[in-house]
Image (cartoon, rainbow, N blue to C red):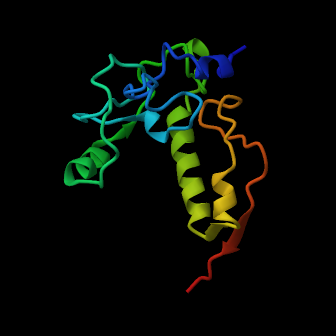
Amino acid sequence: MFTGWLAGLDESCWNTGQDLPSGRPQHPLEAFWAERFLDCPGSSSISGPSKKKRVQPVRKSPQRPTTQMETEDALSKTSVAGLRGHFFPFGGGAFRCPGESLAKQVIFASVAMVLQSYDLRLIDPVEARKIEPGHRELPLGLHSFHRPVPVEVCKLSET
């Protein structure tokens, strides 16, 4: 049996970004951080899902995107490198799913095709900001909230 919850919150394995001046990690495991699964070659910041050696603490607030940031974004690739034993949604060893690459591509394309046909809008954006994510309950990219998030879904008209 795979203990996904435990593996998803193992601080000795996962990248949490740089240390803030307070000593806390920039991106704690309790908070969803999509970039945790991006490997950015030549990036000035820590990238990739696995924990790296810490660099100097973050002291500046986020800046407006620059050409360098845009270049880094273009070179970024999703990665699960370095997570052996902590993240294996398609099994492993002799029983590893041979369709992993296909499944990831199909899921991404399917979600993109569905979402391009709809307009999703938060009913009350101010109240939505107050909703707490339950990332500790579902750590591997899944989301659980302490109450429903009301959204309006409208099919876009075809023109």
User: Which residue is rendered at x = 65% and y = 34% of the image?
Assistant: 135
Q: Is residue 16 left or right of residue 146?
A: left
Most foreground residue, 52 or 117 = 52
| Picture quadrant of residue 77 | top left
Residue 60 can be seen in this image:
yes
Residue 109 % position (x, y) = 53, 53
User: Which residue is rendered at x = 56% and y = 33% of the image?
Assistant: 99
| Picture quadrant of residue 139 | top right
Residue 158 % position (x, y) = 59, 82
| Picture quadrant of residue 2 | top right
Which residue occupies the extreme bottom position in the image?
A: 159
Image height of 103 relative to 98, above or below = below
Q: Is residue 43 left or right of residue 115?
A: left
User: Which residue is rendered at x = 71% and y = 29% of the image?
Assistant: 137
Instruction: Identify the image quadrant of the N terminus.
Output: top right
Image height of 118 relative to 24, above or below = below
Residue 143 % position (x, y) = 67, 41
